Image: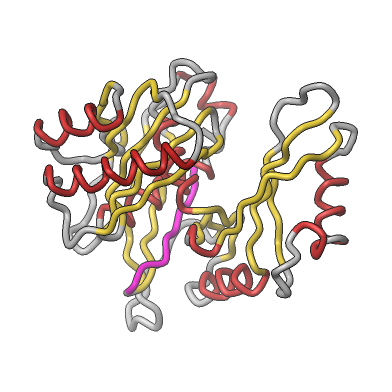
């Protein structure tokens, strides 16, 4: 990454993920010379011996189940500020079935023929306030709140695995007893497939079920011609699973160790899925 990037980017960031028994935090440091080092913490609310973090401002994720995604056509003349104001003033026009107050984030793609499809991410304001309140219970303030899927996807971008921004890729994660297959192009998620499993087995039987779901999903929408699928996992994946996944998705498979090039140890009491989400959030704080 080099000295130039070191000088241009933030040097220290905190990613936090709320788990079932407290909070998983990763303090990530970009060291001189381009290497990275991190330290994980598990924070338990009202602990008699609370862990004190160096940073008090953090980046957090919100469950994808709480995020409403919608593509809206708007004039390219509008600025991001204009679009946000339009959504806030006319929420019922764009989200007629939701009575609760919403908070918005938008992604504006390249403009074509004077118009563009704006990707809108809406979250109930009450859920945002709940996230802020949870952070405050650990004496932290939130700098950003984003969907879990985008936190995970940032790991791929960090490892610079995307060769052609015009092609379509997929990434397979094991998160909270689910296989999650995220289909994306550039920095935009196109589709997501989830399959709940009893535990992390990486069995061919699980793969066959996923393959059937993938075939059904592809028939419902446009057929995705994937250039490559990344399996994001620290441990070795059985070869029969990789071969089967390649056949199911009809593309090349590449393994990605999410913590490669990052000097850190994951404590035994921290689940790898929580660790990966925290990593993606800390990377956002470093602007990488």
Q: Give the camera-side residue of 71 and 188.
A: 71
Residue 206 to residue 96: above or below? above
Q: x, y percentage for residue 22?
A: 36, 73
Query: Would you say 224 lies left or right of 124 here?
Result: left
Query: Would you say 228 lies left or right of 75 here?
Result: left
Residue at image x 68%, y 44%?
71
Q: x, y percentage for residue 279?
A: 39, 46
Residue 98 to residue 247: above or below? below
Q: Is residue 18 magenta?
A: yes
Q: Give the camera-side residue of 232 and 24.
A: 232
* Observer able to see residue 193: yes
- Residue lying furthest top: 164
* Observer able to see residue 29: no
Residue at image x 16%, y 53%?
200
Q: Which residues are magenta?
A: 12-20
Residue at image x 35%, y 81%?
47
Where does the N terminus fall, quadrant-wise?
top left
């Amino acid at each position: 990454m080099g000295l130039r990037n070191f000088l241009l980017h933030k040097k220290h960031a905190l990613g936090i993920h709320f788990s079932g028994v407290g909070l998983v935090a990763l303090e990530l440091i970009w060291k001189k010379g381009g290497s990275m080092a991190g330290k994980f913490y598990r924070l338990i609310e009202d602990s008699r011996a609370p862990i004190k973090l160096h940073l008090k401002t953090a980046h957090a994720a919100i469950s994808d189940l709480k995020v409403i995604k919608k593509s809206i056509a708007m004039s390219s003349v509008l600025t991001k500020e204009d679009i946000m104001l339009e959504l806030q003033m006319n929420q019922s026009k764009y989200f007629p079935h939701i009575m609760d107050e919403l908070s918005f984030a938008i992604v504006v793609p390249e403009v074509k023929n004077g118009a563009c499809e704006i990707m809108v991410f809406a979250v109930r304001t009450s859920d945002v306030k709940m996230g802020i309140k949870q952070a405050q219970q650990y004496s932290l303030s939130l700098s950003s709140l984003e969907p879990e899927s985008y936190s995970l996807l940032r790991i791929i971008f960090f490892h610079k695995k995307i060769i052609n921004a015009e092609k379509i890729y997929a990434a397979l994660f094991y998160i909270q007893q689910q296989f999650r297959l995220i289909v994306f192009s550039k920095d935009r998620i196109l589709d997501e497939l989830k399959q709940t499993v009893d535990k992390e087995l990486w069995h061919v039987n699980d793969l066959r079920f996923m393959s059937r779901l993938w075939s059904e999903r592809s028939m419902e929408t446009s057929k995705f011609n994937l250039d490559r699928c990344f399996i994001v996992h620290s441990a070795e994946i059985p070869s029969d699973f990789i071969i089967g996944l390649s056949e199911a998705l009809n593309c090349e498979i590449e393994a990605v160790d999410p913590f490669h090039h990052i000097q850190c140890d994951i404590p035994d009491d921290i689940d790898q899925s929580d660790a990966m989400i925290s990593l993606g959030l800390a990377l956002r704080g470093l602007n990488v």
